[in-house]
Structures are given as structure tokens and as C-alpha cells.
Amino acid sequence: MICKLRLPFLYCAVIALCLLAQSAFSQNSFERELKQQIDSFLAVKPNVDVTQEIPQVGQRELYPSDAPSALLTPTGFGGYGMYIFGGLGGAYPEVYKNNKADLIASVGACVGDPIEAVNFAASLNMTDVHKFRDFSGNFILSRKLFTGTSIAAGALQMFANNNQSDAPGSTFFMAISHAVQTLPSLTPGSSRLSYTIGLGSGRFYEKSPKDIAAGKGKHGTAVFGSVSFEVIRHLTLNTEWTGMNLGLSVGIRPFKSPISLGIGVANLTKYSSDRANMVFSIGLPLSLTRLMTK
């Protein structure tokens, strides 16, 4: 998620949706912003059924909601166990352009126990879906710190082709997330309220050439964050600061399957970009452990 104006957010979204979809312990997001618009989906995160996949480390410990808690930014909750995942995200209209949508696709896998050690997730992005080109990679490490709290660090949009990518630079970040333990949700094992604070380079700090030309400055805040509240079971309302702008989104897990959906509005302030735009993401994680035991 870097510099362009396209789908930087989407990276986070897809990754987040996939890693987030896992359910509780894993989130973020398929690890959002549509930074200036979707040239940097994060790294998808697989979903997991807390009651079946995650060991109960503490009594009645609450994890994040199983619906996406962030669409534009990564969270500290990563994957759990062995998952493969994929996702698609988009933004409309693309900022500084007229009536053009931008899409990004991502596919990846994660492995590892973030409670006993770490979970490692890697994914491949395709930021030019229409022409089937412009590939890059995401790499995220996550670990549980203590009850309801997890940390993640990673690199986004690595190895992008300078001749094809709208945002060829890489982004590095660290994020810490917490699921509030005193607010249980209607979803068993989940918290109704969770939040994230993080620090990053690239898409979280460097503004696009068009932002600079428009007099919006060269740098964002580098600090990003999100707050997510579960309104009803499997549906969250999310507020996010991407380091570049403000976004609002809804996360939904509509079926018993791990498919997760996110839809929202990005660029709500004049701090960057020339307009607000709609963003969406859909992610699907599949547990390799479950597939192998069937």
C-alpha cells in the first residue's frame, strides 16, 4: 500500500478480510488504505472458528468479532494454523480520475501458532486485474502478546515491477490490536469492541505525486488505527485512520461459511485525495488442517 492513488486500501482489505475472516484470532484484515486507492491491499488473513481452531489459553478469553474489523488498515491479529486464502477488492471512483474503478486480487497462505510461537502469512497481489499483471508480495508475522492482545509486523507490496506498478515502493508496518474483555458479543468467544494502533512507512506516510501537486503536502501521519464495534451478530461498524485519511466501513460475515465481506467509504477528509470514494472487499479462507482431516 503505497503511494499510488489506486487501491492501496484494498490490499488491507483483502488481506484483512481473509485473515480477519478467520473469526476471532485472526484478523485484518487479508492485514487496508485504499491509500490513494487500492494499489496495496495488505495481505489477506484467513478466518478461523475460535471454538474449534484456537486453543483456549485463558478462561473465557474473548477474541475479535468474526466479521471484518478493518477494511483500509492492517490489524495486530494475524492467522492461526494452516490456511490458504484469496480475495478481491476495489474502489470507485479512483481518485484524481473520472468514473474509473480500480481492482486488486490476492491469494496466499499462512502457517504457525501465534500463541506458542508466531504465525507467518504470505500472499501474492495482482494490482492490474484487467490486464492480469503488476504482481507484488505481502509478508506478515503475528504473535499473541497477552489476553485479547496481538501484535503484527509486515511488509506490503514487495518486489513490485517499477515499469508496471502505480506504487512500486514497499510499505513496512507494525500494529498492535486489543479485543476488550469486558464487552462480550452475541458471537460466542468474541468481543464486541476491538481497536488497533499502528505505525508504518510507504502508504501510511508518503503522499502521492498528485496529492503533492494539489498542495496537500508530502507526508501523512505514519500513525494509523481503527476501532470496530459489533452492532449485531456477524456485523461490525468500523472507523479507520489510514495515516492519509479517514474511512468508515461495515464488515459482514453473512453465511456459516468463512466468506467475509466489507464495504465502506474512504477519503472522507481533504487531507489527501480529491474526493471520497466507495471501497469493497471479499475474502475466503480455507483451513488446510480441516481439509486434510476430512
Image (cartoon, rainbow, N blue to C red):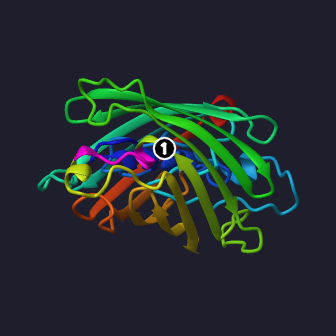
Q: Is residue 81 above or below residue 230?
A: above
Furthest residue in direction left, as rendered: 98
Start and end of the magenta stretch?
203-209
Q: Residues within 10 Å of mark 1 (few under 14, many from 20)?
A: many
Q: Does residue 256 lie above or below 180 as drawn?
A: above
| Residue in the image at 22% along x and 61% along y | 274
For this orientation, the residue located farthest to the right is: 59
Residue at the location (33% across, 31% down)? 168
Work out whether residue 30 can be spotted: no
Using the rendered view, name the quadrant where residue 293 is placed: top right
Q: For this view, does 209 lie left or right of residue 82?
A: left
| Residue 26: % across, % down | 63, 48
Q: Is residue 83 above or below residue 270?
A: above
Residue depicted at 33% across the width and 68% down the height:
268
Q: Residue placed at 44% from the left, 33% from the top?
A: 107
User: In this orientation, does residue 34 appear?
Assistant: yes
Q: Position of residue 19 (x, y in %)?
A: 56, 45
